[in-house]
Amino acid sequence: MKILMGTKNPGKIQGAKEAFEKYFDNVEIEGIPVNSDVGEQPINDF
């Protein structure tokens, strides 16, 4: 199963891979860059 994720974050990709591998065989996840209005590291302005 090949999955495309809208992130290049290795931690998120690995977490998703581990979750999918609990239910499916031969999991391959590829991260792809996407545009969003959310910053790389969301922060609060207090």
Image: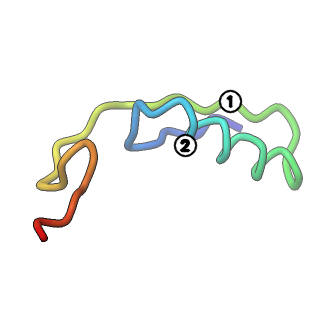
Q: Residue at x 18, y 48 (%)?
A: 39
**Which one is in front in this view, the residue at disc 2 or the one at disc 1?**
2
Among the 4 quarters of the image, the one containing residue 13 = top right
Q: What separation in Å lies between label 2 and label 1 (alpha carbons)?
A: 14 Å
Amino acid of disc 2:
Lys
36 sits to left or right of 27: left
29 sits to left or right of 17: left
N-terminal-most mark, 2 or 1:
2
Q: Residue at x 71, y 40 (%)?
A: 17
31 sits to left or right of 34: right
Residue 20 location (% of width, % of height): 76, 50
Q: Which mark is residue 43?
A: none
Residue 6 location (% of width, % of height): 38, 43
Q: Using a 10 Å C-alpha cutoff, classify the residue at mark 1 as few (fewer than 14 neighbours), some (14 to 19) or many (20 or more).
A: few
Residue 32 location (% of width, % of height): 37, 31
Q: Residue at x 18, y 55 (%)?
A: 38
Among the 4 quarters of the image, the one containing residue 37 = bottom left
* 17 versus 33 height, above or below: below
Circle 1 is placed at which residue position? 28
Q: Which mark is residue 12?
A: 2
Residue 46 location (% of width, % of height): 13, 71
Do callouts 2 and 1 mark residues in contact (Cβ within 8 Å)?
no
Helix, strand or loop status at disc 2: helix
Among all residues in the image, which is located at the extreme bottom?
Answer: 46
- Total of numbered circles in the picture? 2
Helix, strand or loop status at disc 1: strand
Q: Quadrant of the N terminus?
A: top right
37 sits to left or right of 8: left
Q: Nearer the viewer, residue 23 or 18?
A: 18
Amino acid of disc 1:
Glu
Q: Residue at x 66, y 36 (%)?
A: 14
